[in-house]
Image (spheres, helix red, strand yellow):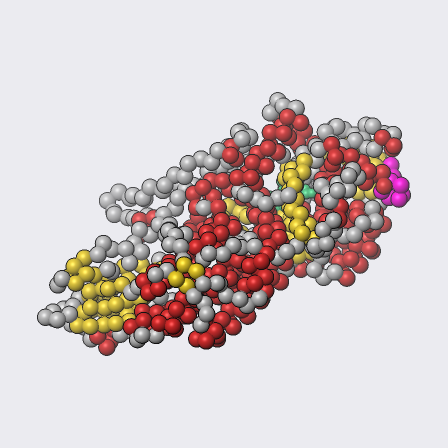
Amino acid sequence: MSCHKKAYITTPIYYVNDIAHIGHAYTTIIADTLARYSRMSGLDTFFLTGTDEHGQKIEESAKAKGKTAQAYADEISATFKKLWDDFDISYDKFIRTTDEAHKAGVQKAVLAMHKNGDIYKDVYKGHYCISCETFFPASQLVDDEFCPECGKSTTIVEEESYFFKLSKYQDRLLEWYENNPNCILPKSKRNEVIRFVEGGLEDLSITRTSFDWGVKLPKEMNDPKHVMYVWLDALMNYLTALGYGTDDKNIDYWPARIHLIGKDILRFHAVYWPAFLMSLDLPLPKHIAAHGWWTRDGEKMSKSKGNVVNPIEIADAYGLDNFRYFMLREVPFGGDGDFSQKALIDRINSDLGNDLGNLLNRLIGMSGKYFEGKVDSSNVDKYYKAELDEVHASLDKLEPLLFEMQIHKYLQELWIPLSIANKSIDRYRPWTLMKEGKEEEAMALNGLIAAILGKVAVMLYPVMPDICTKISNALNFTIDNKSWNSIIKGTNLLDTFTIEKIPPLFPRIEELRLQQAEPIDTNSSTNSGNAKKAKVAKPIETEGIALIGIDQFFQTSLKVGTVIEAKEVPKSDRLLLLQVDIGEDTPRQVVAGIKEWYSTDDMLNTQVCVVANLKPAKLMGLKSEGMLLAAKDNNGLCMIRPEKPKTNGTPIG
Ligand code: MSP
C-alpha cells in the first residue's frame, strides 16, 4: 500500500436521460483541474466520475424511445464516457450505477443501516416529482400541484415504503456544519443548508414499489417488490467505486477530499449523504463544493428551450484548453454565469493571447535576436531580485485559493506574475540594454521572463494541460511533481536551455466562430462524438447602409503602444519616423504624417493607438509597419491616446 497522502475527488454521476451540455462539462472540468493539481503536488489521487442510470425518470425516457432501460442507459452512458475521453478528462474510474459491484455495495449499505435500526417500513403518502426524483410535502408545492424546484407537475404517491431515520441525525448534522466551517463551499451555501436543517428534518422514503428500474432491497430483508430510491442508490456510488461492499480495493481513499456538485443537488449531498454515512459509521467527506448554473442569454439551459450549449462544438471552434480557462476564469465559483461567445473570445484574445502567448513570443523573439535562442538564468537574482520576490509572493498565495474553490481568484492571481514579466520587458527594454552593451543584464532579463513563464505554466497546467505542456516543452522542462517542487515550492529558476521556436499559441480570434451555438440534437444519442462543423458568422447587412458586423470590426487589430524613439524624416515637412513598442519583441517602425502638429519631443515616451495589422508600406523610402489613430478637423490634427496608461500591446476594441 502506498504511504502517500491520498486525495479522492468526485463529480456527480450524470443522469442518462440527457446528452451532456456545458453545465455537465463545467462540473467535470473543475474536478479534473483539482485532480491534476492534486497529482502534480504529489498526492495519491483518485478521481471518480460516471453515470446515474436508475429511477423512474430514466425508465420513462427509455420507454418513450421504445428501448429497454438498460439499452438506453448503455447508449447514453457511453456518450458521456466518450465526451470525457475526447476532453482528456483524467478520471481514474468511470462508475455506472448498473454495475453489478455497485448494486451489491448499495445492498450491503442498506442492510447495515437496517441492522443499525435506521430503516423502518411504513406507508408513504405524498407528492413526487419524477423529473427531480424528489418527494415533496404538500406544503412545499406551488399551487398545490407543481414542483418547487423545476415547476413540473408532481404525482400523488401512496405506497408502502421503507424509511430512513433522517430526523435522528438532525443534531449531529448541525454539529458537523458547526465544527467544520469549510465542509460546504462556498460558505454562503453552508448557511442555506444550516437553515434548511434547522427547519426540521422528516424521515426519508428510500424505496418505491410502483416501478422496478432500480437496485432491489437486499435479499435478507425479504421484500422483493421494493427498489431503492434513486438518490440513495446514486449517492452510494462514492463508496462503491472504491470497492465498498465488494473487494474494498480502494477504500483507503475514503473520505473524499472533495465532492464537486452543482447547487441544485446540494441538499442531497450536504444533508442526506452525511446522514447515510453517519448511519454506516463512516467518516464524512472533507468538502462538498457547489457551483452555480450556466445560463444562456440569462435563461437556464434546458432541452425543451433548445438553448443548450454543446461543449464539443465550443471546444472544436475555440480550443479545449481555452474553453476550460474561460469557464473557470469567467465566473466566481458558486455564482451563475451566462455563456457568450463574445466573452469567450475576449478572454482568449486578451488574457491568453495578449498576456500569456505574447509573452512567450517576446521571449522567443528576444532570445533569438540577441542570444541565438539561449536562455540563461544565472544572473536573474543579481539584476531582478525585486521582480522575482514579487512573483514568488504571488505564487505562494495560489494553492489555498484552489482548494477553497476560489478558482477564478487563483487564475486572477496567476496573471500577476505575467504582468510583472510584461512590465519588466517594457521597463528594462532588452533592445536598449543590448545597444548599451549590457549583455549580461539583457540575458538576465531573458532568464527572468523564462522563469516566470515556466512557473506560470506549472500552476496553469491543471486548467490548461495541453497548452502548458507546449510551453514547458518550449522551455525545455517537464511539468511534474519534481518541477512543481523545484520551481513552485522552491524558488529555483530554469536550467540553461535553448528555446524552441513554437508557433503562436493563441492566434487572435477576429470573429464569432459559431453562428449560434447549436442546440444539441437530443434525438441522436451519439452526437457528442460528432461535433458539428463550426459555422462562420456572416456580416450583417442593412439595405442602403454599409453596416459592418462585430466580426468585421475585429478584423482590424488596434493596439496601445508607446513611442520609444522619434526622429524627423530628412527632407520631409510632413513625416516623423517613430519606433513604437506594441508589446512585441521588437518595436514597430511607423512613418506618420504628423510633423505639422507634433514635434519629436511631443511624441517621445507618449502612448498612441496603433493599427497593427496594416500591410507594411514605404514612405520616402522608409518602411512603415502601422498607422497611428488621429482625428483631424479644420483646427488641425490630434492624436487619439488611451485616457490612462495601458500596457503596450493592449488590444483596443
Ligand atoms: N444524477 C444526479 C447526480 C447524482 S450524484 C450522486 C444529477 N445528475 S444531472 O445529470 O442532472 O446533473 C449533474 C450535474 O450537472 C449537477 O452537478 C448539475 O448541477 C450539473 N448541471 C446540470 N446543468 C447545469 C447547468 N446548466 N449549469 C451548471 N451545472 C449544471 O443531478
Q: Where residue 575 sits in the image (x, y, percent)?
A: 16, 68
Residue 445 as seen in the image, left or right of residue 338: left
Residue 21 as seen in the image, left or right of residue 273: left
Q: Nearer the viewer, residue 439 or 553?
A: 439
Q: Is residue 188 visible?
A: no
- The quadrant holding residue 15 is top right
Q: Nearer the viewer, residue 580 or 439?
A: 439
Figure quarter occupied by ligand 1: top right
- Residue 573 in the image: above or below residue 136: below
Q: Residue at x 87, y 30 (%)?
A: 222
Query: Considering the image in quadrants, where does the C terminus appear?
Result: bottom left
Q: How many callouts does the rendering have?
A: 0
| Residue lying furthest left | 571
Q: Where residue 206 sits in the image (x, y, percent)?
A: 79, 38
- The quadrant holding residue 151 is top right
Q: Nearer the viewer, residue 399 or 4?
A: 4
| Residue lying furthest bottom | 601
Q: Residue at x 49, y 53 (%)?
A: 468
| Residue lying furthest top | 66
Q: Where residue 549 sits in the image (x, y, percent)?
A: 32, 48
Q: Residue at x 89, y 44 (%)?
A: 116
Q: Where residue 411 sits in the image (x, y, percent)?
A: 52, 59
- Residue 194 in the image: above or below residue 65: below
Q: Is residue 290 visible?
A: yes
Q: Nearer the viewer, residue 91 or 287?
A: 91
- Residue 77 in the image: above or below residue 320: above
* Stretch in magenta: 113-121
Q: Residue at x 45, y 63 (%)?
A: 496
Question: Residue 237 lies in magenta, yes or no?
Answer: no
